[in-house]
Amino acid sequence: MTTRALYPVTMSADPQSTAAFYRELLDLEPTFTSEWYVSLAAPGGDPQVATVLRDHDSVPAAFRAAPAGTLVTVEVDSADDVRARAGAMGAPVELELRDEPWGQRHFITRDPDGLLVDVVEPIAPSPEYAAQYTDASRPA
């Protein structure tokens, strides 16, 4: 077996508005657009995100609710640049930009459906946290 892709598909009351949020915030481009589903990708195809109409037949009826208890993390080259973009577009900021000792500079915003989006830039972790990473995964 080969896993070919893994990406979040958010459920939305308005997939076009949700897709517009991700396009503007993260500079993603549509790869498929319909009334009920929009998929987006960065140039080159990765990373990807999609959004589906919450009450579409492809979503089990018992799960057609607004998001809760989920956080999507997006790794970027510059959290400062994306934070500025979020401010310019009026996106809500739920956690202001800050550095974390485990090796992240990040802020948290919220998409139009209430899904939390953690925008992360890897930074050097504190020595305490650096020891918890495998060599290949340690942020620089």
Image (spheres, grey):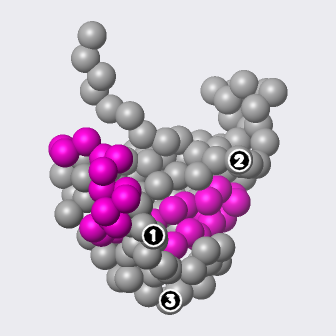
Task: Indicate the secondary structure of the residue bearing disc 1.
Answer: strand
Looking at the picture, tell me which residue is in the foreground, 43 or 14.
43
Q: Is residue 112 magenta?
A: yes
Give the residue number, with chain letter if any, for mark 1: 100
Identity of the amino acid at label 3? Ala
Name the side, left or right, on which 124 lies relative to 89. Answer: left
Quarter placement of the N terminus: top left
Q: Quadrant of residue 79?
A: bottom left
Indicate left or right for 110 with 26 as reference.
right
Q: Residue placed at 34% from the left, 66% from the top?
A: 126
Residue 114 image-quadrant placement: bottom right
Mark linked to residue 22: none
Tell me which label, 1 or 3, sits earlier in the chain. Answer: 3
- Magenta segment range? 107-136
Residue under the point 65% across and 73% down? 94
Say whether marks 1 and 3 touch (CB < 8 Å): no
Tell which circle, 1 or 2, labels the residue nearer the N-terminal end. 2
| For marks 3 and 2 on the same chain, the one whose residue lies earlier in the sequence | 2
Q: Amino acid at mark 2?
A: Gly
Q: Which residue is mark 3?
A: 88
Q: Residue at x 52, y 52 (%)?
A: 72
